[in-house]
Image: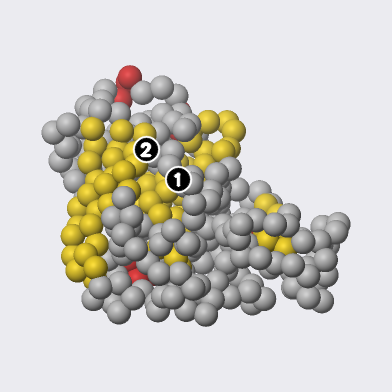
């Protein structure tokens, strides 16, 4: 597979923001990419009439210096499910979101595992946070499984299991106790709103600055003329449950995060649900993540420097 150093990214198509840093491709370090000029002026503001929302969604992106910045209020710009609901008894509320990530993301040999309400894994263009994990856990016996704060060591999955109901909506999202609406999987209603059909669709940016695409990628990572395909993660259920796991007679395999293992080459993507390849916005190639129908649904680690 190609490395970032051999795929020097020259993503300068489109209009560069007035305050965005210009870049000489030769000045980029090995494994460093430029995302200058790509969706630097994305902004939206519209009223969401969904009964559980009835508020104005606001999100504005900008590129200044070496950072890509987002200011948003955490209100989705698409239809949502009903909140509160029996599986998710929380009420959505406006948030004050002011975050930034590198405009020149740099791949590293190691991965960073981050997630949870206080950590930025990434944001969709509409200003909604991605957060694939949950605060729900079980003890070893499986007799006590609070939805939060964490109690046991077995982390309950929001998706791909039927033992617990997290009240997620058609966009694979629900609401945290803080009132924060967030995605656990592909933001289906937002993708539908973009209306690109079967296409590589840039939907957001990870905390390390690399782009996130939804569902489709090129069948040959380095060839933009190759057919599009549904990207598959590279995880599978373990053949044998881990020691001291709650009994499978209570909770089938797949209920807990620990039930799966990464197998390099099993699917299209690496352990962080990403790969190096060309995209419509980055024809020279860049490391990028995917929101997928298969586990882990969204990246649960990052390959870039934070």
The residue under the point 18% across, 43% down is 14
In terms of secondary structure, where does tag 2 sit?
strand
Residue at image point 18% right, 60% down: 45
Q: Which residue appears farthest toward the top when viewing the image?
A: 27
Q: Give coordinates of residue 13: x percent, y percent.
A: 21, 41
Residue designated by label 1: 120
Quadrant for the N terminus in the image:
top right
Q: Which mark is residue 242?
A: none
Q: Quadrant of residue 105?
A: top left
Across and down, in percent, residue 282 comes to 33, 43
In which quadrant of the rendered view does residue 207 lie? Answer: top left
x and y, in percent, of residue 74 in the image: 33, 57
CA separation, marks 1 and 2?
9 Å
Q: Nearer the viewer, mark 1 or mark 2?
A: 1
Quick check: can you spot residue 213?
no
Query: Residue 146 sits in which quadrant?
Result: bottom right
Q: Residue 66 or 282: which is nearer the viewer?
A: 66
- The reply to whether discs 1 and 2 touch (Cβ–Cβ < 8 Å) is yes
Which badge, 1 or 2, is on the more N-terminal residue? Answer: 2
The local secondary structure at tag 1 comes to loop
Whether residue 110 is visible, yes or no, is yes
How many numbered marks appear? 2
Q: Is residue 48 above or below residue 223?
A: below
Q: Of residues 266 and 226, which is closer to you in this image?
A: 266
**Which residue is outermost to the right?**
243
Residue identifier under label 2? 101
State left or right for residue 5 relative to residue 24.
right
Counting from the top left corner in percent of width and height, residue 116 is at: 53, 51
Crowding around mark 2 (Cα neighbors within 10 Å: few <14, some 14 to 19, many 20+) is many
| In this rendering, position of residue 143 left or right of residue 187 | right
């Amino acid at each position: 597979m190609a490395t970032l150093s051999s795929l020097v990214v020259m993503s300068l198509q489109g209009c560069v923001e007035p305050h965005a840093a210009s870049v000489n491709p030769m000045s980029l370090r090995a494994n460093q990419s430029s995302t200058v000029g790509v969706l630097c002026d994305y902004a939206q503001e519209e009223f969401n009439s969904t009964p559980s929302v009835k508020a104005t969604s606001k999100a504005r992106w900008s590129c200044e210096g070496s950072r890509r910045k987002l200011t948003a209020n955490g209100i989705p710009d698409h239809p949502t499910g009903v909140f509160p609901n029996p599986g998710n008894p929380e009420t959505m509320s406006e948030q004050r979101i002011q975050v930034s990530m590198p405009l020149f993301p740099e791949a590293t040999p190691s991965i960073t595992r981050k997630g949870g309400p206080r950590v930025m894994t990434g944001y969709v263009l509409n200003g909604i946070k991605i957060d694939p994990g949950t605060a729900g856990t079980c003890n070893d016996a499986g007799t006590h499984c609070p939805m939060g704060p964490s109690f046991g060591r077995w982390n309950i999955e929001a998706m791909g299991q039927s033992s617990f109901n997290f009240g997620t909506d058609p966009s694979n999202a629900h609401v945290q106790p803080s009132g924060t609406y967030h995605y656990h999987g592909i933001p289906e209603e937002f993708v539908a709103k973009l209306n690109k059909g079967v296409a590589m669709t840039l939907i957001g940016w990870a905390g390390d600055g690399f782009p996130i695409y939804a569902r489709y990628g090129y069948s040959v990572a380095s060839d933009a003329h190759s057919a599009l395909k549904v990207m598959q993660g590279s995880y599978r259920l373990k053949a044998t449950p881990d020691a001291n796991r709650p009994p499978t007679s209570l909770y089938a395999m797949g209920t807990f995060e620990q039930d799966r293992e990464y197998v390099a080459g099993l699917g299209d993507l690496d352990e962080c649900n990403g790969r190096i390849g060309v995209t419509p916005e980055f024809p020279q190639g860049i490391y990028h993540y995917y929101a997928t129908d298969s586990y882990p649904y969204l990246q649960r680690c990052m390959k870039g420097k934070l």
